[in-house]
Image (cartoon, helix red, strand yellow):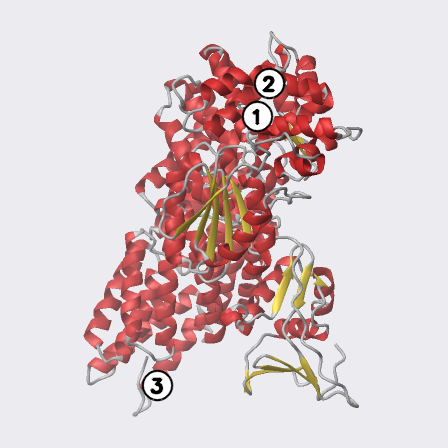
Amino acid sequence: MDQQLGERICFGPFALSPGARLLTRDGAPVEIGGRSFDLLVVLTEQPGRVLSKRELLKRVWSDVVVEDGSLRFHMAGLRKLLGDGVDGARYIATQVGVGYAFVAPVERHGFAGTQAPEPAVEAPRPGTVLNLPARLPHLIGRERDLAFLETRAVDTPVFSIVGPAGVGKTSLAIEIGHQLAPAFDERVAFVDFSMLENPTVVASMISGAMGLSAQSGDPLAVILAHIRDRPFLLLLDNCEHVIIQIAEIVERIVEEAPGARVLATSREPLRVRGEHVLRLDALAYPEEISGLSRTELLAFPAVELFCERAGAADSTLVIDDEAARLIAELCQRLDGMALPIELAAVRVATHGLAATARQLGERFSLGWSGRRTAQPRQQTLQATLDWSYDLLSEAERVVLERLSVFVGPFSIDAALAVAADAEIGSDAVAVALDELVSKSLVAPDRSRRTDTYRLLEMTRAHAREKLRARGLPLYAAAARRHAAFFLAELEAVAEQDEDVLQDTRPLRMQLGNIRSALDWAFGQEGDARIAFRLAAASAPVFLNLSHMIECRTWTARALAEIDDSQRGTATELELQAALGITLMFTRGNSEAAGHALVRALEIATALDDRWNQLRLLGRLHIFHERIGEYDIAMRQAERAVEVAEAIGAPEAIGVAYSLAGISHHLHGDQKRARPALELSIRQSPPSIRSRTIHYGFDHRNRSIIALARTLWLVGDTEGANRLARQAVDEATRLNHAVTHCIALIWSLSVHLWMADLAAAEADLAAFNECAENNALGPYVAAAAGFRGELAIRRGQTGEALDILRDSLSRLRAARYDLLTTTFSIALARGLVLEARYPEALELIDATIARCTANGERVSLPELLRLKAGIAARCTSGTDAGRALLEDALALARTQGALAWEHAISADLAALSVPSGGTG
């Protein structure tokens, strides 16, 4: 960074002076952190140029080694400080997977010599949109539809592309998504519901496609939080079988996210307010062929599509006059439907054009004359699929039918496991699969080098009906093999290294198959033994992908149907453990959650499974800590230490002493808390997402942030501030919403104790955003309480008192008492500011009584100090206040809380000054 001392870089209302390390907005200085300032300088050096993450890290963090999470965190803070996105202002653009660019017009002043201002720089368009499939090289026959949608869709809340199966709705939606992406700042998400069978998870599927991690019971709230104040285009594909659920979600989006737009494809309209419908007709084909030249025939979109697909399948194909006529007849018989045309065109490579035309005529003439009903194009698709099916060998038919039990992608191993049996062996299945791929009835998907296959939705539905027609035993046998395969896969994943669960993409791809296997296993024709194990084996997947409601639903169902042979097993342990943690996340700290965790711990104890005892003691410790039962939490921490020392592994010691240290801290024993927490941090392995999911919480991060609070209490303010920031940075990189919120809550408390209200404000903004974006109800209530506390710290009461009362009420309703003492102290301070001393004294007395009873003693010295201040104001003498302060001072010294001790000593000294007061 070699800008001259006098240089100024101007953009929008801002002026950046690198030499003076000053940023102003409309002439007024702006508070900005050192790293954020350096980041802004580097970005503005080369406006319009995309700077890689590595380059930015090297330039801004040249003195330390950091990870991408720090860059993302500071970038998010810098954007918020600049108001990026507010009232259309654009300063920093993201090139997904590459880096960042400064895109606002820039003027430079103060260079040596003369230099013209930098010209305005056009914002670069990021190269990748969010979850949008690749477009076709050439979308045939949809020019008018594209032009219509491009003109209307941006200004229309909901647009539905409606038409029969196989008409080309999906291809059109993908193409218009690519064309409209710049209008939505590349915020586009494509959701394919063809692989979804359970309508209750529609919202979860949308949030997953948007790349959101919804660690709560309300994924729709998470979706709305992310799109409420920004432009966003949602492409919802294949909606017809879940249309009721989608319609409800779309109505909420229309009502609450004015900048969002929804483009849906379905066989029928959504029938929601504000919906506009584009009815997609078949491709145009010649109704009268005679008299038309080859050039005229080839100009029809249906004929053009046939020729392109047939030419791709057979590059030697020559389209002469006779061939053009035959193709036009084929398109006429297929009524211009895109999918049947493509299927027929591929057949030309194998059977030749004349034979394909002859077979089509022989097989469809009776069907067409007898099946032209109110939905002729659906009947046409059925006829085309029947024809394709009849062309297969018996082995190919059997394999295709059995593959129809897959929902979404499947591997070659999965295909062999499901399709092979005594009737048809694995070698024959492999040969048949190759033939089905070559005939375009099974589509290979190697776009991500996954070597997976899938059936088109209409092909899968058609083949599944054929399988059912063979009789229930054969269908059930295929479904059983399908469920057994995914059970084995999931159980194998659980036994592998924890890094297997780090990458969520393969897991998300298989959600459709996992859900389908669970549906069958728990169904009337299913297998209860498979169902029980499958629910337990799938729980880590649902937890890792933040599908809490699904995890809770399947585990609760499995436990409701448990038989005596399954009780007390490791499988029941996993089910109870998963049920307990998901109930905590989705329904608060309910008794049912506690019962499930206690039962899991009983099983782990009976099985002498010490690692699971430790894991469950950690969850129970946090459960009782949250509901305000600190003495019970302390006993669980002590037991965890015993178990960990029996295990002897550093990771176990790290978890156990995290629990012990936090309990000592909350009990007010900072002398024991500090060494326990420091030991925990030394022994804990680095935080990774899979380990966090396994335990339910990130114990290492909790140790760091608890130690930050402890250090402040023992007088190490600098160390407390450093660790608080470290905990938040690490939690941000972890991308686990609950851990991030926990770090921010405790970091907030440190900065409030330090009276660093600017840092507390920044923490609160991040905490509120994380809580709302992930629909974490208790944390949303807590954010409101912190807003009230900040206002009172600034001497502002007014609405702050009502905000605090409401927050306390909501937290108690959710049985989340961890913050009630903090907010009660803030409320009492606010009442004192308004000279409402009797109310403040009553609140303080009630809080002291509760803390004394439940073991939350960390705040007792401060509570006694506040009570002394109130007593001094309410009485003519100072004796009552002095006695309370002396009690508080003795308690603070016993706890090792030097910070409380200093504050109390200052109040005692003030009592000796005639004009002085306390508080």
Measuring from the top left, give residue 815's x and y in whole percent: 31, 51
Residue 333's disc is 1
Q: In which image quadrant can residue 582 be found?
A: top left
Q: Badge 2: how crowded within 10 Å, few (<14), some, or many (20+)?
A: some
Q: Which residue in the protein does label 2 denote?
A: 361
Q: Considering the image in quadrants, where does the N terminus appear?
A: bottom right
Residue at 73 percent of width and 30 percent of height: 321
Q: Considering the image in quadrants, where does the C terminus appear?
A: bottom left
Considering only vertical position in the picture, is 533 above or below 863?
A: above
Q: Secondary structure at mark 1?
A: helix
- Name the outermost residue toward the front: 291
Q: Amino acid at mark 3?
A: Ala
Q: Are marks 2 and 3 in contact (CB under 8 Å)?
A: no
Determine the CA span between mark 3 and mark 1. Answer: 98 Å
Considering only vertical position in the picture, is 691 above or below 476?
A: below
Measuring from the top left, give residue 287's x and y in whole percent: 57, 32
Q: Nearer the viewer, mark 3 or mark 1?
A: 1
Q: Amino acid at mark 2?
A: Gly
Q: In which image quadrant can residue 620 be found?
A: top left
Q: Are marks 2 and 1 in contact (CB under 8 Å)?
A: yes
Measuring from the top left, give residue 858's x and y in whole percent: 39, 62
Residue at 39 percent of width and 81 percent of height: 906
**Left or right for 174, reference 593:** right
Q: Earlier in the sequence, mark 3 or mark 1?
A: 1
Q: Nearer the viewer, residue 114 or 416?
A: 114
Measuring from the top left, give residue 307's x and y in whole percent: 70, 33
Q: Amino acid at mark 1?
A: Arg
Q: Which residue in the protein does label 3 denote?
A: 910
Considering only vertical position in the picture, is 689 above or below 867?
A: above
- Name the outermost residue toward the top: 423
